[in-house]
Image (cartoon, rainbow, N blue to C red):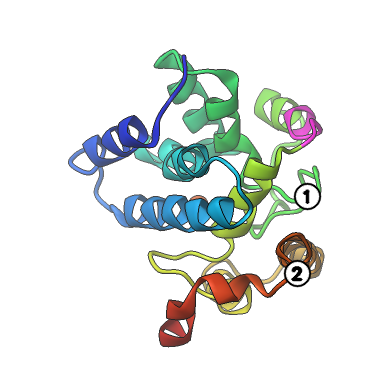
């Protein structure tokens, strides 16, 4: 079943009353709206980009369980599948967390992760599939948005302050910068030109 941004927003907003902390909901709305601006500039499907942005973190509605590897990614994937939506909508819940098709390329520590778990193996293999341009847009927007749109530099400082610095941090920053440059080259101008409000958020 296909999903629209209207329905995705409804699913997202319905979780607001179920959770203690609704920051991820405001963040997801920012990611979806930011993604739609980039999609429009590239003559892509704005509503589809917005939809993926709205649901990418929906797994955070499930109470965190530190024993479950890649908790919000797998919970989001299973939740969207359980609602009957197509693989591409469930898939963004996993793919958004990883750059370069690499399970190691994230902003969080993977040092204590159970690499023998079924979730680890599933996610590691899942993200080897080619990312669509829309999935790459969500990757980038997740690295530009808190609940407002920021430069990737500022967002990465936010992530460093919250998550700390790990063996893979340098790798993740390098890949984030590459992704931003990739979109600059597709647009043939600086992507930040699409977001004049970024200056107010520095
Ligand atoms: Fe996110």
Is label 2 in a helix, a strand or a loop?
helix
* Residue 127 on the magenta segment: yes
**Which mark sits nearer the N-terminus, 2 or 1?**
1
Residue at the spot of label 2: 177
Q: Bounds of the magenta span?
A: 124-130
> CB atoms at circles 2 and 1 under 8 Å apart?
no
Residue 187: name its quadrant: bottom right
Whole-percent x and y of residue 192? 59, 75
Question: Going 41% across and 51% down the picture, which residue do you hit?
Answer: 28
Q: Give the crowd class for mark 2: few <14, some 14-19, many >=20 residues within 10 Å.
A: some
Question: Going 36% across and 34% down the picture, which residue do you hit?
Answer: 8
* Residue 139 on the magenta segment: no
Q: Residue furthest left?
A: 17
Whole-percent x and y of residue 76? 48, 32
In this rendering, would 102 be left or right of 11?
Answer: right
Is label 1 in a helix, a strand or a loop?
loop
Nearest the eye: 78 or 112: 78
Nearest the eye: 84 or 4: 4
Question: Going 40% across and 68% down the picture, which residue do you hit?
Answer: 148
Residue 10: name its quadrant: top left
Up-down relation of residue 137 to residue 132 (above or below): below
In this rendering, would 96 be left or right of 10?
Answer: right
Determine if residue 94 is in view: yes
Residue at the spot of label 1: 104
Up-down relation of residue 182 to residue 86 (above or below): below
Whole-percent x and y of residue 133? 70, 43
Nearer to us of marks 2 and 1 is 2
Whole-percent x and y of residue 63? 36, 38
Determine if residue 67 is in view: no
């Amino acid at each position: 079943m296909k999903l629209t941004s209207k329905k995705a927003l409804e699913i997202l907003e319905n979780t607001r009353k179920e959770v203690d902390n609704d920051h991820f909901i405001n963040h997801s709305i920012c990611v979806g709206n930011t993604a739609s601006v980039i999609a429009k500039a590239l003559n892509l499907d704005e509503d589809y980009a917005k939809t993926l942005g709205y649901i990418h973190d929906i797994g955070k509605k499930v109470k965190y369980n530190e024993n479950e590897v890649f908790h919000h990614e797998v919970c989001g994937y299973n939740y969207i599948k359980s609602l009957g939506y197509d693989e591409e909508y469930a898939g963004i819940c996993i793919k958004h967390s990883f750059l370069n098709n690499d399970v190691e390329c994230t902003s969080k520590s993977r040092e204590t992760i159970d690499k023998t778990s079924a979730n680890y193996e599933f996610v590691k293999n899942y993200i080897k599939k080619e990312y669509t341009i829309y999935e790459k847009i969500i990757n980038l927007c997740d690295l530009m948005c808190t609940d407002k749109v920021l430069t990737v530099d500022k967002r990465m400082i936010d992530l460093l302050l919250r998550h700390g610095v790990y063996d893979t941090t340098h790798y993740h920053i390098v890949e984030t910068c590459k992704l931003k440059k990739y979109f600059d080259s597709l647009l043939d101008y600086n992507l930040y030109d699409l977001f004049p409000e970024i200056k107010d958020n520095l």
